[in-house]
Image (spheres, rainbow, N blue to C red):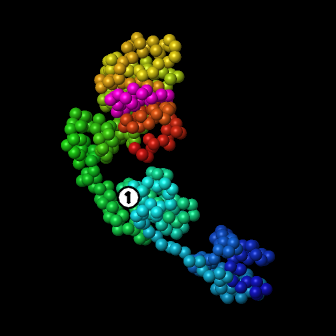
Amino acid sequence: MVNDFETIEDLLESLAGLKKNISLELETTDATIINSIARQVFRGTALTDRQFALMQEKLKSYKEKFEVFDCDFDKAVSTLRQPLREIDRSKYIKICKSSEEIPLAGIDENRQWFKVRFPFSKNLIMNINNIPNKNNNTYFHEKGSHEHYFIKTESMIYQVIDKFIDRNFDIDSEIIKLYNQIKAIKDNPLDHLPCIFDEKVYNVSNDVKKEISNLSYLQIIDRHKRHGLINLTKTDKTDVLSNIVYRTDTFYLSNPNTETLDQVTDCLYQLDRFPLLVVLDESHAEEQLYQCYTNFKNVCLSTEQSVLFRQEGQTDFNKFIKSKKLNNWVDKDTKIVYISCNKLPKVLLKSNWSPIASLMFGGRANRNVDTYIRETSDLVINRDVMISPMRKYSQYYGNL
């Protein structure tokens, strides 16, 4: 039977029960790796140099078991059925100089990408998977490939290089230079970034200084994205006003079970969040309009408010609009506009009026309304108990 075990592949296939009718029990710690590599060579794929060395080491503990079958173990464990398979173990990060280097159909050539290349490694793949804010627009990987493509932005360069700079990658000098510049800014934001910290504003132009000169400190924090500022100030307060002011993104969920509408509208008044768009749910439009009108009537005249939709027939909703004189033209003096969640009035697109904040009831809005809100408002308050799945994965998250 000596000729039945002439190569290391023969030994592996026999241990895994793929070729020889022998009974050899594998150690529990060896079973997974030996079975995996045995199946690989059984399918005709050659061993790599590292697999060869590893299997030679693993098989030593089975020498006596094979010698029972009159096997020249030492010769077999050192002999290959196929030449070793060469593996490209290069690890590099480089800028893609043209769209031809990127396997993306219809790629915009004005967008530049950079490539991260490494041989298969679960640990390195986990690093890739843990990079935040990557999506189909910022990241591409073809299944089975060792190359990962990222859009070349300051944020993406910092996140990627920060994970791989100490992992023995060959990295383009241009990328290293950009990374070091970005890191210096992140490590010393008050020296570089237009930001708010400790009740002071840093590194802003005279135009921005003029824009925020009449704002309170809380109003500046609340509007920091609108003025291109980064808020570095944090708070331990948990009242409604602080929750809104120190929100982490444009969208703010206001749970009616924990926050009253009175509290929310008072915050909008304190922050001077006018012009304001109010998006009503048609099935509860009368109640919602009444509540908002009642809360705002002492700070906004009826002539400064306008309802841009009607219900069919002589409904109480329509009667309320007429009795309170809320059927006004929308112009530069309008502070509050009420619309339905189901339709975006054309007058909003044609007029010079534009909100700086939006108050929604229920979070449901058609695409046109949703897009309008997203493009105009840097504060969107949604009165609902939870974020809807569509809203949760919309462009409000990760892109603003």
Q: Residue at x 71, y 76 (%)?
A: 13
Determine whether, in the image, residue 260 is placed left or right of residue 39. Answer: left
Question: Which residues lie in the magenta part?
Answer: 341-363
Q: In this view, does 24 lie above or below 201?
A: below
In-image side of 224 versus 76 (left or right): left
Quadrant housing the N terminus? bottom right
Give the percent coordinates (x, y) of residue 99: 44, 60
Q: Which image quarter: residue 172? A: bottom left
Residue 336 located left or right of residue 87: left
Name which residue lies at 45% across and 32% down. Answer: 369
Along the line of sight, which residue is nearer the eye, 101 or 10?
A: 101
Residue identified by numbered label 1: 158
Q: Report the residue at 42% width, 34% height from top.
A: 372
Q: Which amino acid does label 1 sit on?
A: Tyr
The reply to whether residue 347 is in sight is yes
Residue depicted at 76% across the width and 87% down the height: 2
Quadrant assignment, res 197: top left
Tell whether 323 sits left or right of 11.
left
* Percent of width and height locating residue 98: 42, 62
Task: Say what secondary structure mark 1 lies in.
Answer: helix
- Count of marks, rendered view: 1
Position in image of residue 10 (x %, y %): 71, 80
* Residue 305 seen anywhere in this rendered image of the structure: no
- 301 inside magenta stretch: no
Image quarter in which the C terminus is found: top left
- For disc 1, the neighbor class at 10 Å (few under 14, some 14 to 19, many from 20) is many
Residue 360 painted magenta: yes
Residue 139: horizontal and vertical position, in percent? 47, 56
Above or below, comparing residue 101 to residue 313 in the picture: below
> In this rendering, is residue 310 above or below 360?
above
